[in-house]
Image: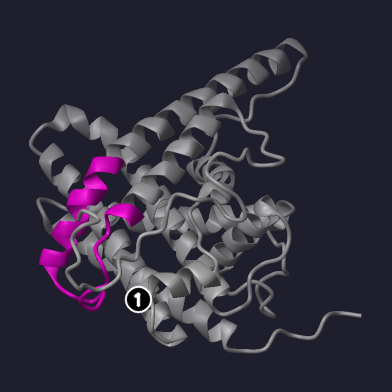
């Protein structure tokens, strides 16, 4: 729509690709990642920003039917292959690093620990991408929805995220359906499943962060610590600082990393519904992603309505 078009319409819920607590051009302070992982993290964050930017103004409920899923899948399909390619590069980089470490270990009588587990690689990817995700603060959220109440804005955010994760699931299922007729390309399916898991998780991290910002409960700290807190919130499926969320900065330390890997492994396993024959996989994956996104939002919103527990003395 051009600037000269003054037709009245619902405000587009489209954030610019701006990371938490910073601008698009700012380096992420404290970011230390490998070249393959860094490129994949940038590709993932760019893909999420592209999906959010292409999403239309809030429309029907997230529980709407397959026509809505096909619309979301059209946008998701254009970025899914990019994320899959970036994920393949990160996996190769991690594997090469492990091969070098294994060679050094054998020369010193040590043992190789094998290839990076999918949950670990996806966890590293999300951790590196999180500070780049376009999470808006309360002022920008309210500016995008003039006249709406906080509850109405929250409902719109949940509906948008559910549309997008449903579209990603439908896109993955559609690709898998096409590949049933070309068996050699089934070798690419695990990468598509990993890309689906990473994309849906990143969209949900944006949702979690914006629900916190909207509720006036933003995570404190710099960009990386805030992003880590929102990623921890996604991992535990609870609001930042909730009594059972594992603490405000649960992502810092081995326990938080383990929780992230477990959550990603569960989501990756759920993504295998995309492999059902023909377009059944697309329908199942879209429905499953929408349901999981809405359930996550319901838990986080319930926590955000509850006062924070008193600080431990």
Q: Is residue 33 above or below residue 119?
A: above
Can residue 77 be found in the magenta stretch? yes
Please give the range of residues in magenta: 52-79
Work out whether 264 lies above or below 218: above
Of the pair 19 and 185, the residue shown nearer to us: 19
284 vs 298, left or right, is: left
Q: Residue at x 62, y 89 (%)?
A: 306
Q: Position of residue 105 (x, y in %)?
A: 72, 18
Q: In this picture, is 255 found above or below 150?
A: above
Which residue is the extreme one toward the right? 313
As for residue 75 lying within the magenta part, the answer is: yes
Main SS category, magenta section: helix
- Residue 185: quadrant of the picture: top left
Query: Residue 283, image x and y in percent?
Result: 17, 62
Residue carrying label 1: 156
Seen at 54% across and 72% down, the residue is 138
Name the secondary structure under disc 1. helix
| 116 sits to left or right of 31 | left
């Amino acid at each position: 729509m051009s600037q000269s078009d003054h037709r009245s319409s619902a405000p587009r819920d489209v954030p610019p690709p701006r990371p938490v607590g910073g601008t698009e051009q700012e380096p992420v302070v404290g970011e230390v990642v490998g070249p393959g992982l860094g490129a994949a993290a940038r590709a993932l964050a760019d893909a999420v920003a592209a999906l959010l930017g292409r999403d239309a103004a809030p429309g029907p409920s997230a529980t709407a039917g397959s026509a809505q899923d096909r619309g979301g899948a059209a946008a998701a399909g254009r970025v899914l292959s990019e994320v899959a390619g970036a994920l393949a590069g990160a996996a190769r980089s991690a594997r090469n690093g492990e091969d070098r470490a294994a060679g050094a270990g054998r020369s010193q009588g040590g043992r190789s620990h094998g290839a990076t587990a999918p949950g670990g690689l996806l966890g590293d990817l999300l951790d590196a991408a999180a500070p780049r995700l376009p999470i808006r603060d309360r002022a920008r959220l309210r500016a995008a929805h003039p006249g709406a109440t906080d509850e109405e804005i929250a409902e719109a955010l949940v509906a948008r995220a559910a549309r997008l994760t449903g579209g990603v699931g439908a896109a993955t299922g559609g690709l898998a359906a096409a590949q049933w007729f070309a068996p050699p390309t089934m070798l690419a399916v695990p990468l598509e499943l990993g890309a689906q898991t990473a994309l849906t998780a990143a969209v949900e991290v944006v949702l979690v962060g914006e629900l916190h910002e909207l509720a006036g409960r933003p995570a404190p700290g710099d960009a990386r610590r805030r992003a880590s807190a929102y990623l921890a919130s996604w991992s535990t499926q609870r609001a930042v600082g909730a009594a059972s969320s594992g603490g405000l900065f649960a992502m810092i330390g081995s326990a938080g990393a383990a929780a992230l890997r477990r959550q990603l492994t569960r989501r990756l396993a759920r993504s295998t519904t995309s492999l059902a024959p023909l377009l059944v996989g697309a329908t199942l994956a879209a429905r499953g992603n929408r349901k999981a996104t809405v359930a996550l939002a319901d838990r986080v919103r319930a926590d955000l309505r509850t006062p924070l527990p008193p600080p431990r003395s």
